[in-house]
Amino acid sequence: MSLKQPLKIVWISANKFGHELLKEAIHYEGVEISAVFTLSKISKTVMYDGISTKAWSEFGVPVFEVNNINEEIEKIKDLRPDFIFICGWRQMIGPQLLSMPGCQVIGFHPTLLPKGRGSAPIINSILAGFCESGVTMFYLSAGIDSGDIIGQNKFVIEKDDTAGQVHDKAIISGVRLVTKYLPLLVKNQAPRIQQIESDATYFEPRSLKDNEIFDTDTTEQAYAKIRAFAEPYKGAFIKKGGKKVIIWKAEICNEEKS
């Protein structure tokens, strides 16, 4: 009697979030990480929290550096994956990858979907004043973060949390989701919960122009920008004397006048 072959996973990621989740996933019986696809140094896609190719090589699986994942369809097909995990990737996934025969594409989004679909979720969650967020593990579809949900793990965003602190909380939540649901995916027992479209909200894209603090900003707005654009991002800034002054950290002082 032959033993059941492990399910093959192709891992697509270019940042610390995906790296930490792979640390958890690679130890599970019943799965085989066939390859990691990460961004090349010459890719036009910028990952502010990206990590080196050397870090991916430490897992002992083939690592492919790519400019655009949608140009690697044939290479991925040759690996015959049962699952593609995408976690920490700033390129839209095209229809050829989403519809690859015999393969399910799994994604992670650091909000509680369907709330907060779209761009820059950690930055936008802080700017929007979210007190609670989390990570959603879901089946990717052609829509923007609209696929069926596998599971969610919540965390609190404290009033003084910076982007880096929220990022760390997202990593912890993501690891918990892998721990809970990867074994169920292997057994074909993972949930599939349809998102409620009427509850969906969308975040607007962000650019470096949004990092600027203006004289017209309230104290709360300025403080939110400093927190939201802190490391691993580029930092909030003011323009003073023709120069750009980056503000990495601040606190609000409520001093009473004597």
Image (cartoon, rainbow, N blue to C red):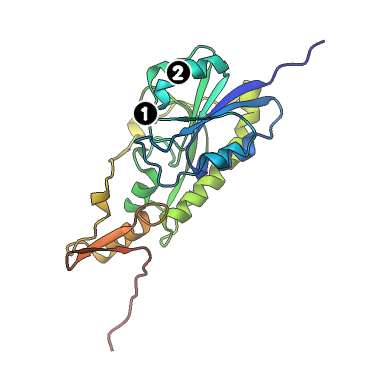
The mark nearer the N terminus, 1 or 2, is 2
Amino acid on which disc 2 is placed = Ile
Q: Residue 120 carries which label?
A: none
Picture disc at residue 73: 2
- Where residue 10 appears, as percent x and y from the top left, is 55, 25
Q: In which quarter of the image is the N terminus?
A: top right
Q: Which amino acid does label 1 sit on?
A: Met
Asked if residue 177 lies left or right of residue 68, the reply is right
Task: State the image coordinates of residue 8 (x, y, percent, origin top left).
Answer: 62, 21
> Which residue has dot 1 on it?
92
Location of residue 157 with respect to 249 vertically, above or below: above
Q: What secondary structure is marked by label 1?
A: loop
Can residue 129 be seen in the rendering of this structure? no
Task: Identify the residue at horizontal 48%, vertical 33% (top origin).
Answer: 38
Corner quadrant of residue 229: bottom left
Say left or right for 36 vs 69. right
